[in-house]
Image (spheres, grey):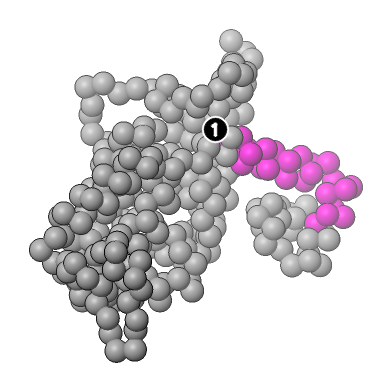
Amino acid sequence: MRCNKITELLDLYIDCELAEETRARVDRHLLRCSECAFEVRSLEQTRALLRDAFPSAESSPAFREKMAARLLEEFADQLRPEPIRSEGQWSLPFLRENA
Amino acid sequence: MPPRSDTYHETRLVERFRQGDANALSTLFEMYVDRVFGYARHILGSREDAEEVVGEAFLRAFRRAADYRGDAPFHGWLFGITRNLCWDRLRQPRLLTLPVDVAEVVENDEPARAALQADVRRALAALPEDQRDVLVLCDIEGWDASEVSNILGRSLAATKSLLYRARRALRHGLTESWKEEEQA
C-alpha cells in the first residue's frame, strides 16, 4: 500500500473502523514508513490530549432533582398522577408510587 | 444519544408523555440529561451556563413534544435546541467573560499538565463552530458518527470528513501555538 492510500485510511484506522485485513495492511505499512507512523501517532496524541483537557462532565444531582421537579410543575396541567395503562400492559407498583 | 434500537423506546415514551404519563417525562429527562449536559459544558466552559442552557432546552423540547404530532425524534429536537442555545450564548457580548482556559479549570495539581490542558482548550475554542461541535461530540463525548450526522443534519460521509478536518485543524492549532512559544 502506498502512502497516499494510507493517508486516506488513517482516521478509520485510529477509530478502529477498518476491516481486519485492511488494518493488517496498514499495520505493515506503518512498520516501515516513519512518516505515516508519525502521522498516526500525532493524530492519536491530539485526541488523547483533547480527552484529557475535557474530562467527563455529569450534571449534579441537585440540578437533576431541581430540573425534574420544574418539568413536572411546568407540565402539571397535561400530566396525570397515574401512568396510563393500555390494554395488556401492567402498571408496576413502583411506577405508581413514583408517579 | 441513543443507539438506533432505542429510538422505538423513545417514541413510546414521547407518546406516553403526550397521554399525560409523568413517569415518561421523568424517564426521558434522565435518559438524556447527562449527554446533553456534557456537550453544553464542554462548549460553554461553565457548569452554571450549561445547567441554564440544558434546563431551557428540556423545557422547549417537551413543549414541542406536547404540541407536535409527527414522529420526529425527541433527542434530535433536544440536541438541536441545546446547540442553538449554546452558540447563541457564546455569541452574546457579556459584561464579564472568562477566558476559556480559566473558565474550565480542571482541578489539577500538576502545573505542566494543567498548562497543556489550557493549550488544548484554547486551540479548540479557536476552531469554527461546526468543527468544535463534531470534536466535542465524537472525540470527547464518544457519540457514534452516524448519530452525530443525524443530529447535525449532514450525511455520514460529510460528518466524518468534517471530523477528520477538525482533528487536523486542532493539531495544527496546537503545534503552531507551541512553535510560537518556543520562538518567544
B90 in magenta: no
Q: Residue at x 51, y 56 (%)?
A: B143
Residue B56 placement (x, y as % from top left): 23, 48
Q: Is residue A18 above or below residue B167?
A: below
Q: Residue at x 19, y 67 (%)?
A: A81
Q: Which quarter of the rendered picture does the C terminus of chain B lie within?
A: top right
**Residue under the point 26% across and 47% down:** A67
Place of residue B157 in the rendered image (x, y in percent of width and height, measured from the top left)? 53, 64
Q: Is residue A35 magenta?
A: yes
* Subunit that carries the residue with mark 1: A
B132 horizontally vs B52: left or right: right
Report the residue marked by disc 1.
A53
User: Which residue appears farthest toward the bottom when viewing the image?
Assistant: A87
> For this view, does B42 lie left or right of residue B109?
left
Magenta highlight range: A25-50
Q: Secondary structure at mark 1?
A: helix
Which amino acid lies under the numbered mark 1 shown in the image of this protein? Answer: Ala
Q: Give the crowd class for mark 1: few <14, some 14-19, many >=20 residues within 10 Å.
A: many
Quadrant for residue B80, please give it. Answer: bottom left
On-image quarter of the N terminus of chain B: bottom left
Q: How many marks?
A: 1
Q: Is residue B4 visible?
A: yes
Residue at 69% in and 52% down: A14
Q: Is residue B76 visible?
A: no
Q: Is residue A29 left or right of residue B1?
A: right
